[in-house]
Amino acid sequence: MIAPPETMAAALVLVPAVAGAAAFVIRRHSARRGLLIAGALVHALLTADVCLRGGDPGSSGWLVLDATARLFLGITSALFLTAAVYALGYLRREPPDERHDFQEDVLFSNAPEAVLTGCLLLFLATMSLVVLSRNLGLLWVAIEATTLVSAPMIYFHRHHRSLEATWKYLLICSVGIAVALLGNFCLAVAAAKAGQGSSSLGLDPLVRNASHLNVPWLKAAFIFLLVGYGTKMGLAPLHTWLPDAHSEAPSVVSALLSGALLNCAFVGILRAQQVLAAAGEAAFGQGLLLILGLLSIGLAGVFILGQTDFKRTLAYSSVEHIGILALGVGLGGAGAFGSMLHAVNHSLAKGMLFLLAGNILAEYRTKSTAHVRGVPGALPVTGVLWGAGFLAICGLPPFGLFTSELTILKAALDQGRTGVAVAYLALLALVFVGLTTTFLGMLQGRTTTPGAGRSRRESVLEFAPPMALGALVLAMGVYVPPALSATLHEVARTLGGF
């Protein structure tokens, strides 16, 4: 008997939420880690069933399974499963926190790992709730929840820099969420003036009655939602929390922050743009997204140049690619399709690179690019994958990001926006120069680890997860499955494209 879509959607939130709560009280490391893998695997299987089945359960209930939800749910689940497998090896090599060595009789024993594992699973639950939310009020609550459950993971290493990054993350994102709340209030007013009553924040009634919404209030709502969720998404100049949080968090967490969390805030903006497009005002939102997209790419390029911390380099690269996502939606049509394809490719590639960064950091014990040389000599498999990841994240063929970036460029040229296309290419070239300096410097030269001159045998758990992500990025550059392509086109149509 096949469960109804509403039940499947609820299970996607409840399964990791229950597993996360249980992880806080389980004493044995092995049992807790097993629970992490089990939760990730069950979520992935449920997601696969939902995505393969397709469709939408209709207008009832609080959770939606439309094309946008299926797309970002698939990205989140696949990346989380890969990160969970990597976390097994990561947690084994992490030194225990001596403050908890002799507290086995206390609830929440082995607190640092228990908190990390529990918060990882709760993070999956809240991110799933974000992409599945049918009501924009519920979506707002879910995005705030992702902030609260991810903050303890950024502070995992208990360092003063981790504490600073955590507080900056909490304060800036909370301000952004407060601004987004004002956007919801404005949207409710716009809906109330259209006579939608108590269901005014439901996505379906908003889209269905969009032509009757009060346009000035709707535009004000979009601006507040764009600023609020744009802060969480990392759009410049609202990105200031992102480099610190991504560089100080454990690498497995950084992979999820960059590859999955930023997409959740993006979903909030996409839902707002969906309502705007249904009201016939898509051009208003597209113009703002285009400007912020170019600004984000340019600012990221400036900060990547001369960057001396390779994890911060990856963080600023996320700002760049978030800008590309916004630019694609801003162009609309084929650009929106390219943006959705880029969301898939970027999440996979950036997840791969952050996991590899964890391997490099564990071996070299530093994030300074000046002290990391000859990575292939110390970590042969990681070194090769690091080079491949560099090619992928720069958007070079045959990797998937080349296809999605080229699609967005073609959309700009087809629309006669030559200035946008030239600026886009120039800013991508700036980013490429900065990334080349960082990556090639780390790949070349003599190995600088204590065991210089000899390579060590790497654990399968260290390289298999990022290798799998890299293989997917490569495959996406060669072949986009028809089912995925159809989903991408369907999402683009809701945003005012095609």
Image (cartoon, rainbow, N blue to C red):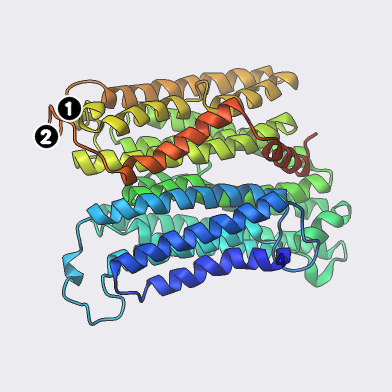
To which residue does mark 1 refer? Answer: 447
To which residue does mark 2 refer? Answer: 451
* Up/down of 207 relative to 114, above or below: above
Residue 413 lies in quadrant: top right
Mark 1 touching mark 2, by CB under 8 A? yes
Question: Viewed as shown, does residue 304 lie left or right of 371?
Answer: right
Residue at 80% across, 59% down: 204
User: Can residue 183 be seen?
Assistant: yes
* Up/down of 289 relative to 421, above or below: below
Residue at 33% across, 26% down: 439
Question: Viewed as shown, does residue 372 lie left or right of 177?
Answer: left
For the C terminus, which image quadrant? top right
Mark 1 belongs to which amino acid? Thr
Frontmost residue, 397 versus 230: 397
Dot 1: element: loop
Residue 319 location, x and y as percent?
Answer: 48, 38
Residue 202 location, x and y as percent?
Answer: 76, 63
Question: Viewed as shown, does residue 310 lie left or right of 193?
Answer: left
Residue at 48% across, 63% down: 39
Residue 398 location, x and y as percent?
Answer: 52, 22
Frontmost residue, 342 versus 36: 36
Question: Viewed as shown, does residue 457 lie left or right of 490?
Answer: left
